Image (cartoon, rainbow, N blue to C red):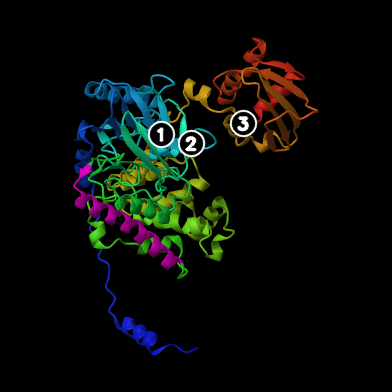
Amino acid sequence: MKFSPFLLLTFLLLSCEPTKKIEQTPSLVPEDLKKHTEEFRKEVITVTEGIHVAIGYSLANSMMVEGEKGKIIIDTTGTIETGREVRAIFDQINPYPIKAVIYTHNHGDHVFGARAFIDDENTEVIAHATTKKYINRILGILRPIISKRSSRMFGSAIPEEDFENNGIGPFLEIGKDGRQTSLVYPTKEFEDNLKLTISGVDIHLYHAPGETNDQIFVWLPKFKALFPGDNFYRAFPNLYTIRGTPYRDLVGWVKSIDKMRYLEPDFLIPSHSRPLEDSQEILKHLTDYRDAIQFVHDQTVRLMNKGMTPREIASEIVLPEHLASSPFLKEFYGTPQWSSKNVFTGYLGWFDGNPTTLNPLPGKEEAKKIIAMAGGWSKVLDEANKAIKEKEFQWALQLTDYLLLENPNNKEVINIRINSLGSLGEIQANPNARYYYLSSAEELSPSFILPPLLKPSQETIETLPIEIVFEILKVNLIPEKSLDENLHLNINFKDSSKAFSLILRKGVLEVQPFEIDGSDIQVETDEVVWKEIVSGVRSLPVSLATGLISVSGDKVRLISFFSAFRE
């Protein structure tokens, strides 16, 4: 193979260039997190005439745009009570009715307060075409695990005196102090972009995938005002969130920010953190933000192509100093390290390339072998105690994984784990990591009660589509209780005239949105009654006894059917 003289010369010149090492910016400390609380000082800010933002009331901001004898709300906070508090202030500023509510995306802190802002069916609720699907996903099949991990990440069980802020807002109010969520689906949806005029205000909406796939941004050309949703805020972005999320496409996120940059906004009003003004300053921060995201993506891919594993890549990813020192890229929410693992998984999936991880030993078997190799359980316990004394808390935590797999109720090991988690949490300035450690320590207390973060309200139960309820039922089937079962159940709903067939077949539940002949049991009821039974709010035997459910066939088998879904 021959190279041109020019290419060869270029290669030689580049090969002789000294490699400049990226300097590590000093890590944040808890004192930095305390100072960050000022970002969420509770107030309603008038950004410019006709645009107002309520910050500090909720994890997410709520914004109001004034029009002619009407107003528009962008994002609604996370509970009805918080929404009412914000609405009362907005109504004092502008008493005209709310003509439209815009969801920037599906996250609960942006949509669950909607009921407070919607007076009747004349209020339009506008969102991307996929927002309803993602709301249903959170409330449906993933509600238990998302609720548990969100509770840890947001510190829902952390005592108030130990709580600072959540990095992008003062606190998550969902599930706090008995506050209630609401469920209001969009009434107007769009795919790529939508231009409309509401109360005399020209509004341009653009699909802008980033923190979520359904993310949009709002552009008001008259004001040159941009509402970026969660694609920009005063913290390094959650390119991956430890509560769990679908893959967040970094390339798409960068493109979305580029769309915003070239609008040259004079005002930037994020859904988290304080608004900005001055087009040059906004341009600089948006540019740094997109460059940081692209840097993590590009460098992760480069190191992937060198054959490095996610753990190895995470240890290598360091932002250049000019980005790491930006006030908008401090690690108060996401981190480049977590983000690089997300990029790896998004491109290559779970397998890290090391053949050892293809079929690893089950955790308990590995623990037995490691403990035996170390000289026995007491030897590993001694090492864990030594690690605590020497403040090697991560090592102590990892050792408790092995010890508890062998002896899950040992109080001494549990105390070592609590000590390790608490110590690791206390030194963290990243709220997500901080509260995940501290919450995990709290959970080990015998008196711990999991906060009801996403407990479905009666409104949620009634509003959730029946199709989603059947999806929830499918993923709650316990194989051990159904491997010998073959049952065909047809259900007719009197209130909606919908019919479904449920076929329980040896550990799998098939659901079809139509009747199939040959059923063993025929059920007739209302959708709400069925939803309440599935969610555990209503008793099946009582519903049978009171006639809320009418059954043709074996009622005992129907009760047995439901027992296959109860742990």
Instruction: Based on the picture, tell me whether residue 394 belongs to the magenta stretch.
Output: no
Q: Residues within 10 Å of mark 1 (few under 14, many from 20)?
A: many
Three-letter amino acid code of the residue under disc 1: Gly
Mark 1, residue position = 108
Label 1: element kind:
helix
Residue 470 numbered mark, or none = 3
Mark 2, residue position = 138
What's the distance in space between the residues labelled 2 and 3, CA to CA? Answer: 15 Å
Does the rendering let one see residue 62?
A: yes
Left or right of 289, for residue 451: right
Q: Earlier in the sequence, mark 2 or mark 3?
A: 2
Q: Residues within 10 Å of mark 2 (few under 14, many from 20)?
A: some
| x and y, in percent, of residue 160 in the image | 28, 31
What's the distance in space between the residues labelled 1 and 2, CA to CA? Answer: 9 Å
Q: As displayed, is residue 298 above or below residue 566?
A: below
Q: Earlier in the sequence, mark 1 or mark 2?
A: 1
Q: Quadrant of the C terminus?
A: top right
Which portion, as a residue range, is magenta? 276-304
Left or right of 390, for residue 365: right
Asked if marks 1 and 2 touch (Cβ < 8 Å), the reply is yes
